Every structure is written in structure tokens, then in C-alpha cells.
Image (cartoon, rainbow, N blue to C red):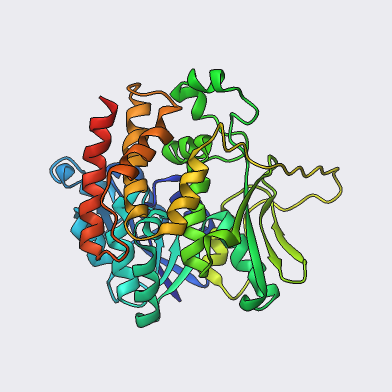
Amino acid sequence: MNRIAVLGSTGSIGTSTLDVLAGQRDAMQLVAVTAHSRWQQLAEQTRQFDVPAAIVSDSSLVDSVDRSAFATGCEVRFGADALVELAASDAVDTVVAAIVGAAGLRSSWAAVDTGKRVALANKETMIVAGPQIVARAAETGAELLPVDSEHSAIFQCLAAGRREDVRRVILTASGGPFRGWSRQQLEAVTPDDARKHPTWNMGERITIDSATLMNKALEVIEAKWLFGLEADQIEVVVHPQSVVHSLVEFVDGSCVAQLSPPDMKLPIQYALTWPERRDCPSPKMDWSANWSLDFEPPDRDLFPALDLGFEVADRGGTCGAVLNASKEAAVDRFLAGEVRFTDIPQICRAVLDAHHFDPAPSLSELLQLDAWARRETIKWTR
């Protein structure tokens, strides 16, 4: 029985993971769920799955949470340290790392440090500390299995050949809600505009990142570290239908693609059951219907965030931590109506250029830079 902890169980990835687990009770046991502040939803999940442990990471809620709302016998704990302890616990075999942002790094590290399988939906773990995480996983025997649909697709396509025969990987991007818009239109984008993704149902900040193509920039960095690639072995192509999730091209010119409807339950389940495949609750391709699959190059002039991703993937070192932190802070400012949509990549560029680059930082140095970049972003946006 695979004992699974879902970190961030009330978010979009977390709830989709629980949908998967509902159909896999013969092979998987949900042993812990966590949320930052949505404790009522968390309590409902513990009752639905009879979960023995739950964590509310916002410790300020310790006196306001109704413990009687949770499943009978469920241990309710509070604070970020409890997340780390859970991720390292011997009672857990697989950690689904679905906490959004750099806040999920410490718990992801703890899971890797103790040799667990990590179903990695928190891409920031690899953006901030990719080389360190990969090296530690090699030492402990931890398995890093991607949950992002694009990286899951690459992981699956790589099985078609030898790693040394890979010429490049091609990440697909939907193009977001503003594909084909003019610069003038982009400057007038509101948070409500940016929340409306054409094909995916995702969390708010991830949806904003998709609209700027910053999400794809981060995926370029993640792909470099997950799959041991060089930056020039990674390309991005816009594919509005979001059916082809990514491709791998081999040295002989063969391209292998992974296709499925845009639904996260399939890559989530594959990360949990690999190398086995099982029936999945995600929708299936309807090959009796007419299909049109379009591909086009991204407009890097209008969406400069993508260039930041390739630059950071190439430079490595401290760049990923700085880019991610400044991006998160800039998105917060945009959602608050304090900067324009088009300011987000410009702010990230300015903060990245202002930082003192270190090619081989320690984890503690990366965390310090994360805090510095957030403070610096506030200066740039006042």
C-alpha cells in the first residue's frame, strides 16, 4: 500500500490528486493532507478519506480551527515546521508536493532528503534549487517524478529512446488568454482578464504566470534540471489546443509526442503509479471527432518573460531563486492593482540584473536571496 501525503490538498492540483486517489484505494492510502488557511475544506477531506493527519500551515489559526470538524482520530497540527516533519516522516512513502510557490521548497527538500518518491507539482523547488535537489536525490535514492503536464509528457516520451540520443525537447504552451493581442491591449490587461485561461483550470497565480508566459519560462528551467539538459536543447512552441503536452526529438529526426485532453489527473496519477499504468478518471481522447492541432512560435517581443527563462536556465546558480521570488512578488503587486500586467517581466529583469550572481550557492544562501529579491521587487514597484 502506497502511503501518500498531499501537501497543498485544497488547491487545484491537490483536489485533482484526491480525485485520483478516490479510484485507487486498493493500492494507495491517503495518510496526510495539508492546507495553508482553508481548514474547513481540509477538514472535509479528512472525513471523506478518513485521513489520520492534517496540517494547517498558517499557525495564526491555531485558536480558531474547530478540531471537531476533522475526521475522528485525525491529528491536526499547525505551522511550516510541521510540514517539513510530515514530509520526512517514516509514515509516508510518497509526497505530492503541490504547495504553490517557494513556500513548498523546505518540505520538498525534506522528502528528497529522506529518499521518498516526490510527485513534483511545485515547480519552484526545481527553479530555486534544481542542482541541489537533483544531487541530493541521487544520494538518497529519492525519485523525482514530474506532475506538470509538460514535464510528465517529456518523461513519458523519453522512454522511446536513449538519453544520449535526445537532440532536444519541445515544451508546448497554450499561449494563454492574450495570444495575438497587441502591446497596447496588453498594457490595459486587468487581473480579471488574466485569470481567464482558455484551456486549463488552474490556481490564480499559475494562471497569471501562464498569461505572461512566465510559467513556460519556469518550465524551461525545470526541464533543464529534471532531465539533465542544456538550455539550447529546450524549445517552446505555442499549441492553443493543449492536447500535445510536449515532444522529444531524437538525433535521427524522430519526434515523439504525448497527447491527452487538458486535465491534470493523468500526469498526477502517472507520477503516483509509475512505472505501472492504471485506469484513470481523466477524460480520454475522442478519435471519432474532427481534430485540428496547431503550432506556432511564441512572440518573444510581446512576452519577454520567456527569454528570462532561457537566460536563467543557461546561467544557473542564484538566478533561479531571484527570478522566482521577484516573479511571485510582482504578481502579487499586479493582483493588488499596483503595477501593470506588462510590468511583471520588466520588474523581474531589473531585480535579476541587480543581484550578485553566485554560480554555486548553498541552500541557505538561496533562501536568503529569495527574501532579498522579494524586498527588492517592492522597491522597484513603488
Q: Is residue 196 visible?
A: yes
Question: Could you say where residue 140 lies in the image, as x and y percent from the top left?
Answer: 35, 81
Of the 4 image quadrants, the one containing the N terminus is: bottom left
Instruction: Tell me which residue sits at (35%, 82%) in the image.
Output: 139
Q: Quadrant of residue 296?
A: top right
Instruction: Tell me which residue sits at (46%, 21%) in the image.
Output: 190
Q: Nearer the viewer, residue 266 or 154?
A: 154
Question: Could you say where residue 131 lies in the image, as x and y percent from the top left?
Answer: 38, 68
Q: Is residue 75 visible?
A: no
Question: Could you say where residue 184 lies in the image, as x and y percent from the top left?
Answer: 54, 18
Q: Give the vertical position of 354 relative to 122 (above or below).
A: above
Q: Give the vertical position of 340 relative to 270 (above or below).
A: above
Count of numbered labels shown in the rendering: 0
Q: Quadrant of residue 294?
A: top right
Left or right? Give the position of 109 relative to 20.
Answer: left
Left or right? Give the position of 197 relative to 322.
Answer: right
Instruction: Tell me which residue sits at (54%, 40%) in the image.
Output: 201
Q: Give the vertical position of 240 relative to 93 (above or below).
A: above
Q: Quadrant of residue 132?
A: bottom left
Q: Nearer the viewer, residue 81 or 354?
A: 354
Instruction: Tell me which residue sits at (46%, 51%) in the image.
Output: 311
Q: Nearer the viewer, residue 37 or 231?
A: 231
Question: Could you say where residue 183 lies in the image, as x and y percent from the top left?
Answer: 55, 22
Of the 4 image quadrants, the one containing the C terminus is: top left
Left or right? Give the position of 225 relative to 66.
Answer: right
Left or right? Give the position of 198 relative to 316.
Answer: right
